[in-house]
Structures are given as structure tokens and as C-alpha cells.
Amino acid sequence: MTELMRNPRVMKKLQEELKQITNGNTHRSLIQESQILDKLEYLKQVIKESLRLKPPVTLIARRTIQPCEIQGYIIPADTRVILNAYAISMDPNVWERPQEFWPERFDGRKVDFIGRYVDFLPFGSGRRKCPGITFAMAIIELTLANLLHCFDWSLPGGMKVEDISMEEATGITVHKKEALCLVAKPKW
């Protein structure tokens, strides 16, 4: 929601997709899971881009099982290796305009969350990836779709987009240090 508030073009495009999927029907009907799974492509791109910019877990620890060489460095077996998912997601050698919130970068790109793509690891990878990926994505998709389908969003009186704090706090996952406060106006 923070990135959508900071990028009204993306919010509008996403709301248009939702309107199209529901045939403009805003008569107190929620978006259903069956509508999301195969039709809301832009919604999926927005979520992927949000997870790329702000991965919930930034450091992924692993242990090597055999020796390997990475860019000329020999990594012995049984060495603890830490992957920085945030650094990977901000690498200009991997991502065009990495600092920009640009969901269209995922258009036509078959990038998933299960850890096959080393440049996109919001839920980790391998045997120790997050076991709740499917559940998390279903909840995120349904929640975001219904929040945008049922409400118009704005900042509280006098607040500007530049006033939104992007400061993060760490814990088990990374999260906003200051809560995002918005005004929701029901569409119905």
C-alpha cells in the first residue's frame, strides 16, 4: 500500500484491472480467489515488485555441502554463506532501474517465488525456503485486491506523499518502522 500511495499511476492501473475483472461491478461483492488465480496479472506484478524492493527477509544463511568457486574465491565445504536478498534485488547489473517501483518489469517474465531465480528471493530458496509461500501469496493477493476494489485510498488531511516514512525496522522480518495511516473511502 505504501508503494501504491507513492505511485498513483500504478494504483490507478491496478484498480482498472480490478474493475475490468469484475466487469465494473462494485455492488458490495468481494473479489474471489478464483478471479485472482489466473486473471489479475498486474496485481501479481505489483506484489512481485513490492517484494523485490522490500524483501521480508533480507539475509539468507546457508551452509555449503561441497567446495565451490565463486568469482575466483574458493569456498570450502561446510562454510556458512549469507546471501543478501536486498543487495541482489537492488543490483543494477541484474535489474534495470533497481531503485524505482516499476511493476511492469515483471510483465512477460516467468519469475516465481519458489527460489529458482537467484535474482529474486523474497522467500528464500531451496529446501529451506519459506513453507508458507502459497498461503502468504493467496492472502496478499486477496487482501490487496479487495482493499483496492472496495475502497478509494488517500492520505490524511494535509499529508503529502513525501511525508510517508520509508524507514524500516528489523526483527524476524523487515517491516515499516512507522505505520502507514490512510483514509479509506468506501466505493459502495
Image (cartoon, rainbow, N blue to C red):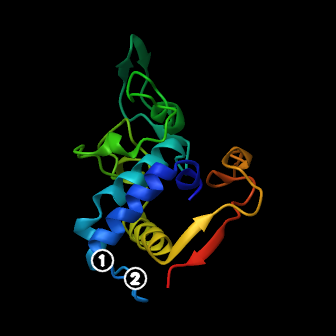
Considering depth in this image, is 41 or 53 the residue closer to the camera?
41
Examine the rendering and report whether any part of residue 79 can be seen. no
Mark 1 residue type: Thr
Q: Is residue 92 above or below residue 164?
A: above
Considering depth in this image, is 8 or 93 the residue closer to the camera?
8
What's the residue at 68%, 53% (across, down)? 176
**Distance in Å between CA atoms under marks 1 and 2:** 8 Å
Mark 2 residue type: Thr
Residue 47 position in % (x across, y down) = 42, 55
Considering depth in this image, is 95 or 158 the residue closer to the camera?
158
Answer yes or no: do the residues labelled 1 and 2 have beta carbons within 8 Å? yes
What's the residue at 44%, 23% (across, down)? 92
Considering depth in this image, is 157 or 177 the residue closer to the camera?
157
Residue 48 position in % (x across, y down) = 40, 50
Q: Is residue 23 above or below residue 128?
A: below
Residue 26 bears which disc, if any?
Answer: 2
Task: Give the residue pinned by disc 1.
Answer: 22
Q: Secondary structure at mark 2?
A: loop
Image position of 22 (left or right of 64): left
Q: Is residue 151 above or below residue 65?
A: below
Examine the rendering and report whether any part of residue 134 can be seen. yes
Q: Secondary structure at mark 1?
A: loop
